[in-house]
Image (cartoon, helix red, strand yellow):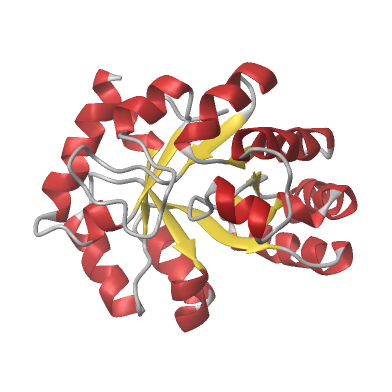
Amino acid sequence: MPAREPKDRLVVALDVENLGQAETLLDRLQGVVSTWKIGSRLYTAAGPAAVELVQKRGGSVFLDLKFHDIPHTVAGSVREATRLGVGMLTVHASGGSPMLTAAAEAAREAARELNVPKPLCLAVTVLTSLSRALLQRELNVPLAVEGHALHLARLARDAGLDGSVSSPEETRTIRNALGREWVIVTPGVRPAGSGADDQVRVATPEAAIRAGADYLVVGRPITAAADPKAAALAILEAIARA
């Protein structure tokens, strides 16, 4: 089930170069943040040691590697992620139904065989850096972003996944269509006054929560702040208000 306490709904992105930088952030946010996103940058640099670093400090890991390959390969990757004990992981919804089904089945089977909790398997719908123009002009997708994200979320649900990763702009539509049990993780969250950086579909923490997000993923507004702890606490307050 999705988290309900503000502290458990904020996921901070450890998009840093190495374990030393990750450890510094973990130290500065100890007791404030309980869930950390490990993406391709840190995982490429440090591998499973990054997951272990978070876990040894009592944190939960959202392994955001966006697996996107043939079904057999993705199933193997999901199995290894489950073995690592991560709380959530991602696959690309655009990999298609056979790949999505393989991922969902691998997580269930690996959790049972290894006697570990099953991670939430989440389907990435449309990256927050993609605009409608890019989606249509370069990727030849005729649907609007909202419609395409909903289509991919439904595909993932029918394949047995637990939820989706979608920008704040699509969250309300997906929540209304797929119901309360569908887990929605929302990146592209920016406090009022923050720059969007390279993301084009963004919203404030309050707006994302009110739209129906279960988890908010926040990176640079916290990790690049002069005082990461104060920045994280401000976002937690916004979540509580919403």
Q: Percent position (x, y) of residue 223?
A: 24, 59
Q: Which residue is at 83% across, 51% downward?
A: 96
Q: Quadrant of the N terminus?
A: top right
Count of numbered badges drawn on the protein: 0
Q: Is residue 229 left or right of residue 216?
A: left
Measured from the top left, where is residue 166 in percent x and y? Answer: 55, 41
User: Relative to 19, does residue 205 appear above or below in the rendering?
Assistant: above
| Place of residue 219 in the rendered image (x, y in percent of width and height, measured from the top left) | 33, 55
* Residue 179 visible in the snapshot: no
Q: Is residue 14 left or right of residue 134?
A: left
The residue under the point 74% across, 35% down is 151
230 or 170, nearer to the observer: 170
Q: Nearer the viewer, residue 32 or 95?
A: 95
Camera-side residue: 38 or 158?
158
> Image quarter for residue 70?
bottom right
Q: Quadrant of the C terminus?
A: top left
Residue 4 x, y percent position in the rendering:
42, 24
User: Looking at the rendering, which quadrant does residue 176 occupy?
Assistant: top right
Horizontal side of residue 9 vs 154, given as left or right: left
Image quadrant where residue 152 sits: top right
Above or below 177: residue 68: below
Residue beneath the point at 70% across and 66% down: 80
Q: Is residue 191 visible?
A: yes
